[in-house]
Image: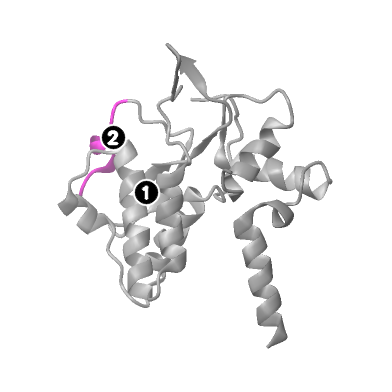
Amino acid sequence: MRPKTLARWRRLTLLAQGQMPEMVLLEDANDLCDFLESTGRTVRRTAWAEESIAAVREQMIEGYF
Amino acid sequence: MIPEATRRKPGFDEAHSAPVVLSDGQRWYVPKPWVEIRPVFRDGQAVSAYHVLTAGPELDELVEAIGEAESAQLQVIGAASLAAKLLRHHYELADEDLDQLLRFRIGDDSSLAWVEAIIEIATGQCVPKRSRAGGA
């Protein structure tokens, strides 16, 4: 199985929107993904991308101390 | 001092670049990364469709190395490596040129400024923006 990275989450989120150009500036891709995530139109990155899941877990563990 | 404009490579694209003031006090331009959403095929093989800097494993590794660096010195080395990669996309620069441009002085705000700017550009956080999708 391919790793669930943030980069894949971004690409899949953009692909899921249908008509997209072949290339988009990274800064625009990030903004578009933020927009889609905050409006509930994509899976939350913290629930899909392994890096984000690990970061959330780390924050929770730090919160205990 | 190296005159910035004389080192530009053919195809230098200011419109999709971000300015950074380096340690020589001049404004240099580094390319903003692009994300390839769909592969473009030529003769059955996926090829890069544009002569642009594509965000991918190589850039990600350099950014990650800065984040994971265990000392400020390693962070600066990581940022300088990232800056060198971005600068060489646009300019003809030898190692001794990069030595001049990417100097870091502890406690110097301008040194910190170029390090922060380079990381922001490489991770797609740079402002001001020029929003234009569809390739260069």
**Given the current orientation, which residue lies at the most extreme top position?**
B43
**Residue A7: quarter of image:** top right
Compare residues B38 and B116 and report the one nearer the observer.
B38
Q: Is residue B122 above or below residue B50?
A: below
Q: Chain of mark 2?
A: B
Task: Name which residue lies at 70% across and 40% down.
Answer: A32
Side of B86 relative to A12 (left or right): left
Could you tell me residue B19's position as x and y percent? 43, 46
| CA separation in Å, label 1 and label 2 | 13 Å
Q: Residues within 10 Å of mark 2 (few under 14, many from 20)?
A: some
Amino acid identity at mark 2? Arg
* Quadrant location of the C terminus of chain A in the rendered image: bottom right
User: Is tag 1's residue or tag 2's residue first in the polypeptide sequence?
Assistant: 2
Amino acid identity at mark 1? Arg
The label shown at residue A49 is none
**Residue B26 visible somewhere in the drawing:** no
Residue marked by disc 1: B27
**Given the current orientation, which residue lies at the most extreme bottom position?**
A65
Residue marked by disc 2: B8
Could you tell me residue B135's position as x and y percent? 52, 25
Could you tell me residue A6's position as x and y percent? 60, 49
* Quadrant location of the N terminus of chain A in the rendered image: top right
Q: Is residue A27 above or below residue B40?
A: below
Q: Which residues are magenta?
A: B2-10
From the image, state whether disc 1 or disc 2 is nearer to you: 2
Side of B62 relative to A6 (left or right): left
Could you tell me residue A53's position as x and y percent? 67, 61
User: Colour scheme used in the picture?
Assistant: one colour
